[in-house]
Amino acid sequence: MSRGYTLDSFALLTYLRQEPGYPRVLEVLQGAQAGQWSVYLSLINYGEVLYISERLGGRRAVEETVRIVDNLPLEIVAVDRPLTFQAAHIKAHYRLSFADAFTVALALEKGATILTGDPEFQSVEGLVEVEWLKTAP
């Protein structure tokens, strides 16, 4: 495999809602389906997408989100002690949310590019590769 991508909640929500940036997320997922690269999602970021879905659409929205996400060609990575410690270290040194720190830690662990449109990731561009999704048509 040539390289991989790590999705944050912004990228996954972009895909689920078909917002601007959707075509690029779809292209990355199709590449994973074709075996060109791997796509990773931290369980923490999955949880973030679930609580946002529930706030906006209730339990039915959560059930639909789980149905869709669990069928995507991505690897949902459980959070273990080393990943948590790495995320805590990142959070201590960079201005981003703790959930986003897990995205960075996972990208570092996997040697992957973060796919996002969340401006918080500007603070870690020197630490990890970030590919920016278009946020407006």
Image (tube, rainbow, N blue to C red):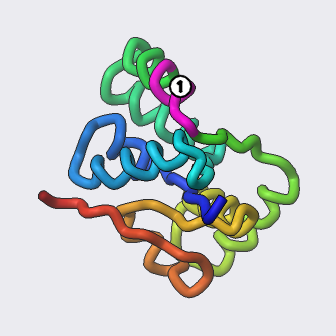
**Image location (x, y in percent) of residue 57:** 32, 22
User: Which is nearer the eye, 54 or 35?
Assistant: 35
**Image location (x, y in percent) of residue 118:** 38, 63
Quadrant containing the C terminus is: bottom left
**Image location (x, y in percent) of residue 134:** 25, 63
**Badge 1, how many Cα within 10 Å: few under 14, some, many 20+?**
few
Residue corresponding to mark 1: 71
**Image location (x, y in percent) of residue 79:** 76, 46
For the magenta stretch, what is the residue range? 67-73
User: Which is nearer the eye, 3 or 94?
Assistant: 3
Residue at 79% from the left image edge and 57% from the top image edge: 83
Task: Confirm whether the magenta stretch covers residue 8.
Answer: no
Q: Is residue 109 left or right of residue 31?
A: right
Above or below 130: residue 65: above
Above or below 52: residue 126: below
Q: Secondary structure at mark 1?
A: loop
Above or below 71: residue 21: below
Residue at 33% from the left image edge and 62% from the top image edge: 133
Residue at 49% from the left image edge and 80% from the top image edge: 123
Q: Is residue 81 left or right of residue 97?
A: right
Quadrant containing the N terminus is: bottom right
User: Which is nearer the eye, 35 or 22?
Assistant: 35
Residue type at mark 1 is Asn
